Image (cartoon, grey):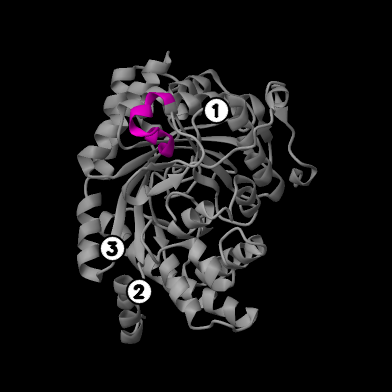
Amino acid sequence: MINIWEVNETNKMVEQENLDVRTITIGISLLQCVDSDLKQLKENIYRRITTVAKDLATVAEKIENEYGIPIVNKRISVTPITLVGAAACRSEEDFASIAVTLDQAAEAVGANLIGGYSALVSKGMTRADEMLIRSIPEALCKTKRVCSSVNLASTKTGINMDAVKLMGEILLEVAGRSKDRDCADCMKLVVFCNAPDDNPFMAGAFHGVTEADAVINVGVSGPGVVKKALESVRGENFEVLCETIKKTAFKVTRVGQTVAREASKLLGIPFGIVDLSLAPTPAVGDSVADILCEIGLEYAGAPGTTAALALLNDQVKKGGVMASSYVGGLSGAFIPVSEDQGMIDAVQAGAVTIEKLEAMTCVCSVGLDMIAIPGDTKATTISGIIADEMALGMVNQKTTAARLIPVIGKGVGETVEFGGLFGYAPIMPVNPFSCDAFINRGGRIPAPIHSFKN
């Protein structure tokens, strides 16, 4: 039972320390919608989503009012569309038309975003996979709520370098199609290594084939809460520091667990997981980088940053696991640039480079996230950055991702404004030396030796 002291403490976290439930995400299986007729398939998809998620917005508002906890986003994730559309789609345009249907369904139920315009190609691409990937620029251009992800690598299968090369080209095409909006559609596209089946966070959410017909996944976030807690133990040793993070993560996860179970009961959909991720926003005091500074760094990126982030990530997970029956998704700490004011400050001060961020992704939850790069960056260079990130995930047996934004018409030293939760970002320099011959080899990088477990 939660006592009155815990209630008061939670209220303080909400009012003063930016605690929120970042998202309630309904995962919906579309496998029962499969049909060889495209028109019928789209009708099935629209009906399925609008039936299962019809009360999503209403329930979220009811929980907000009852518990006083802000729920920032209502989201939907669906079965990867390559699996759903393979029998009906004969062209890239066919796949893009499914994205429009997803967008319409999400709008009808009041969802902010819908994820699952996805392909899983870590070992190879089917014809449907390649068609969907090549349709991503058109799909994102024609929709407002649809998010896309592609899993390019895994510890078990290696890195599909053909797909890595293709995604560098696709990302530039997405940027070109949305250049009048500072290439904003790139924010809705992410590539993964070891993508989880139960991730509630966009742009990478999809409903994995191992999941039930429908599930409720909740993502909570509390960088401001952790930062405030650490202010009370300044100068203390690492044991005290770790205990403070762990206890705070436990309290934050309890909030997510409560919301998840209430949403599950009201919607009549099984509870899946709580994703305890320290996901920042541009709001002052809601920054993962500021937590690293509170631990003892002048800026995120200073010597010791990777160690501090490793400590933070581990203690967040330890505290969270004790507070919920099922913790999953991408739990830990996110280190996006544009969405974290402390990270933006570190970039502008010269404390953080893409190479340092890459090192930090060895120990964080996700990877190179929301990073704006010059619009004239070559496709092969983008593919090289993606390949490096995939290799980190593959070798370290963890989830890694890359969400890069080549901003057409802008270069290093300029900034790009995205607005809202997406914030703004300084354009970061990329290594100017060529990796063309490496990327153009084609084929697959084999899985590491320690992948052989059976």
The question of residue 178 being in magenta is answered with: yes
Q: Residue furthest right?
A: 449
**In the image, 200: left or right of 181?**
right
Residue indicated by mark 3: 70
**Residue at 35% from the left image edge and 54% from the top image edge:** 23
Q: Which amino acid lies under the numbered mark 2 shown in the image of this protein? A: Met
Q: Magenta residues?
A: 176-188
Q: Give percent across and percent down for residue 338.
A: 44, 49
Viewer-proximal residue, 357 or 320?
357
- Residue 13: numbered disc: 2
For residue 158, above or below residue 227: above
For residue 365, above or below residue 291: above
Label 1 sits on a secondary structure element that is: helix
**Residue at 74% from the left image edge and 44% from the top image edge:** 451
Q: Are marks 2 and 3 in contact (CB under 8 Å)?
A: no
- Residue 167: numbered disc: 1
Q: Dot 3, crowdedness within 10 Å: few (<14), some or many (≥20)?
A: some
